Amino acid sequence: MRHRGLPALLALAIATALLGSGTAHAAPVGVPPPGANDWSCVPSPEHPRPVVLVHGTFENMAKNWSLLSPQIKQAGYCVFALDYGNNATGRVENSAQELASFIDEVLAATGASQVDLVGHSQGGMMPRAYLKSLGGAAKTGELIGIVPSNYGTTTPLVAPAGVVCEACTQQMQGSPFLADLNAGDDTPDGPDYTVVTTRYDEVVTPYTNAFLHDGPAGDLTNITVQDACPNDLAEHDQSPNDPVVVQWVLHALDREGPADPGFQPNCLL
């Protein structure tokens, strides 16, 4: 029996990450994760901005946010989440329109003037189209991207996935969509920006393609989890469930401005 070579194993791992872990099918579309979508929630003076969770490609809100959503809720925030873009496979511009409509519903229901956005993978990048082109910068206090595909990926399996996933083709490094999104200032004025990524990201490659570049230090923080916790093995698909990533997200939400680069999470949780 022939053993799989390293390239074949790597391709299998990337394909698994791109297409989800297999549990996405067990999480029904349209069902919010625990703690999310209480439309009677009134933001507190301590946390006046509702938090909107934006899932990644081939995901849905129930699967992507089952662990993080209740933790944000427990920290005292109104939490909302949406499904969009046929499991985020449709054109990113159309998904940004869906996000814009959802945020308007959240603002109307809560009486808030702004939201904070937390997104995974495409869900950390797609909101930037909302901020840049759909007036979202005025309605957003902070964008926290968890392994976001801000500058795309060199992953070779993205091109075949594009047959059933327009958003996958748009997330290829150097795509016309990303060239337009990142032209000029990649951090439009208004929100603060926090990017949390991992050296073990096998989907957004190289992992530094998650980073944003144009924001001043007071508005933008790029974080690699291994800088503070060298033994953390967070990868792409499960990064929203990683305890260190969760701490960075809660830290960024709980302060004015982006995450403090000097914050030290508990690496032993």
Image: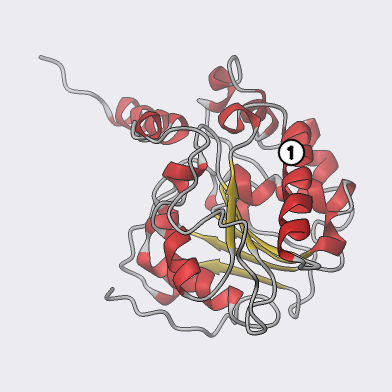
**Amino acid beneath label 1:** Glu
The residue sitting at 72% across, 58% down in the picture is 109
Residue 191, compared with residue 27, is above or below; it is below
**Image location of residue 267, percent across then percent down:** 33, 76
Specify the quadrant of the image occupied by residue 90: top right
The residue sitting at 80% across, 61% down in the picture is 187
Residue tagged 1? 98
Q: Is residue 42 left or right of residue 76?
A: right
Residue placed most toward the observer, 161 or 251: 251
**Within 10 Å of the Cα at label 1, are there few (<14), some (14-19), or many (20+) other Cα atoms?**
some
**Image location of residue 106, percent across then percent down:** 71, 55
The residue sitting at 79% across, 75% down in the picture is 216
Q: Is residue 266 left or right of residue 53?
A: left
Q: Is residue 75 left or right of residue 145?
A: left
**Image location of residue 203, percent across then percent down:** 49, 40
Residue 160, compared with residue 135, is above or below; it is above
The residue sitting at 61% across, 43% down in the picture is 122
Q: Is residue 28 left or right of residue 187?
A: left
Q: How many marks?
A: 1
Residue placed most toward the observer, 133 or 200: 133
**Image location of residue 162, percent across then percent down:** 60, 20
Residue placed most toward the observer, 51 or 178: 51
Image quadrant containing the C terminus: bottom left
In this rendering, does residue 221 appear at all? yes
Residue 52, compared with residue 183, is above or below; it is below
In this rendering, does residue 150 appear at all? no
**For numbered disc 1, what is the local secondary structure?**
helix
